[in-house]
Amino acid sequence: MKRAGYPEESTEYVIEKLRNLDDRLQPVLDRWLEGEDEPDVAVNGVTLAKVRKYMDREFLRAMIRLSRYAESEEFAARFLEDPDRFRMRRCDVSRLRFSWVEANQYRRGDDHGQRN
């Protein structure tokens, strides 16, 4: 997870999702974990490269998303029909007030009444 640059807080979530990865994607993940370059793979017509292009996701998150397209041909078809609709919007994280940890504490109410 360090290789992909994940914060410790999201590691468990990503690992759980990867455990349930579609069987067709597991060999691709295994090769990547062994140090190979990111291979392209397609399921239900959706390629990993297209997911990365339109959804602005790094490799592991793109694999998780691609696994969802593998589960549902209808979902894959909707993406292929209009991939721009699925495009992730970027934000300037330097302008965010809270760190990742602080934001999660705020959502959970763990900040001991320190909300601004």
Image (spheres, helix red, strand yellow):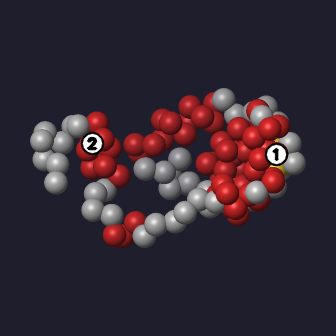
The furthest residue to the right: 45
Residue drawn 21% across and 37% down? 110
Alpha carbon distance from label 2 to label 1: 37 Å
Say if residue 85 shows up in the picture.
yes
**Within the image, what quadrant is residue 108 found in?**
top left
**Could you tell whether 86 is left or right of 81 in the image?**
left
Residue at which label 1 appears:
77
- In the rendered image of this protein, does residue 84 appear above or below residue 61? below
What amino acid is found at the position of numbered circle 1 in the picture?
Ala
**Within the image, what quadrant is residue 94 found in?**
bottom left
What amino acid is found at the position of numbered circle 2 in the picture?
Gln
Quadrant of the frame with the C terminus? bottom left
**Could you tell whether 72 is left or right of 33 in the image?**
right
| Residue 79 spot, x, y in % from top left | 75, 50
Residue drawn 17% across and 48% down? 115
Badge 2 element: helix
Give whichever of discs 2 and 1 has the lower sequence position.
Answer: 1
Badge 1 element: helix
Residue at which label 2 appears:
105
